[in-house]
Amino acid sequence: MFALCAGLHLGVGAQGIFTCIDGRGKRLTSDRPIPECMDREQKELNSNGTVKRNVGPVLTPQEEAAQVALDKKDMEDKARVNEERRRNRALLARYKNQAAHDASRSEALTQVDEVIRAANARLADLAQQRKSLDTEMEFYAKDPSKAPIALRRRITDNGDSVLAQQRFIANQQQEKQRVNDRFDEELARLKPLWSGAR
């Protein structure tokens, strides 16, 4: 790594002067990067003595890996902060105040309720169908095995449909909870943003 670093600086610093203080406290000067100061900062000076740039120490592989990890974490932190700001701007643009947010929550919950009502209506239809099927089965009350296969299949299908509708309704009830949780989380984020905006 030293050879690479020195090679890079040779061309750039051919006109300049490198100076540093080594580990023993001695000031060293050279027309190229100083090997004794590769573990510390060196200054590259212009011909008039002003500082052209500072050259950082050459990192060990472990230090370089740690620096890469630190840079990556810093970039991720900045990306997260930027994403938070973007989300906050989007929320503020969508909901100017709590009344708008409450109206949006109510609309979302109403949509789920309508789906649940439709599923309950389907359950009621299935219950009516089951009554008709049970009436037909009364003819075979003494020996249900003599009931036609088609009738038994319709009864089985009816039961499966009822279970499916019940599972669907349970899922929609959970969806209502998810909707409320999402709006609660948004509201917690929005309240300080609204206060700041005012």
Image: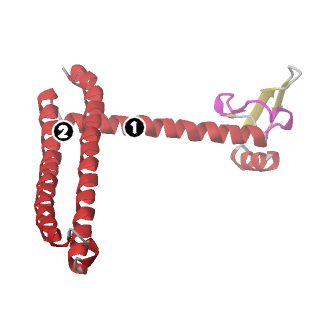
Say above or below: 169 vs 41.
Answer: below
- The residue depicted at 76 percent of the width and 34 percent of the height is 18
Check if residue 51 falls in the magenta segment. yes
Nearest-to-viewer mark from 1 and 2: 2
Residue that numbered label 2 is attached to: 94
Front residue of this view, candidates 55 and 174: 174
| Dot 2 crowding, Cα within 10 Å, few <14, some 14–19, many 20+ | few
Looking at the image, residue 74 sits to the left or right of residue 13; the answer is left
Which color mode does the image show? secondary structure
Q: Give the image quarter of residue 16.
A: top right
**Amino acid type at image mark 1:** Asn
Q: Secondary structure at mark 1?
A: helix
**Amino acid type at image mark 2:** Arg
- The residue depicted at 59 percent of the width and 39 percent of the height is 71
Say above or below: 125 vs 153.
Answer: above
Q: Give the image quarter of residue 184.
A: top left
- The residue depicted at 12 percent of the width and 42 percent of the height is 107
Image quadrant containing the C terminus: top left
Front residue of this view, candidates 188 and 179: 179
Looking at the image, residue 79 sits to the left or right of residue 180; the answer is right
Picture coordinates of residue 173, whole percent (x, y): 24, 43
- The residue depicted at 82 percent of the width and 31 percent of the height is 29
In this rendering, does residue 89 appear at all?
no
- Nearer-N-terminus badge (1/2): 1
| Dot 1 crowding, Cα within 10 Å, few <14, some 14–19, many 20+ | few
Picture coordinates of residue 166, whole percent (x, y): 25, 53
Check if residue 39 falls in the magenta segment. yes
Residue that numbered label 1 is attached to: 82
In this rendering, does residue 104 appear at all?
yes
Q: Which residues are magenta?
A: 31-54
Q: Which mark is residue 198?
A: none
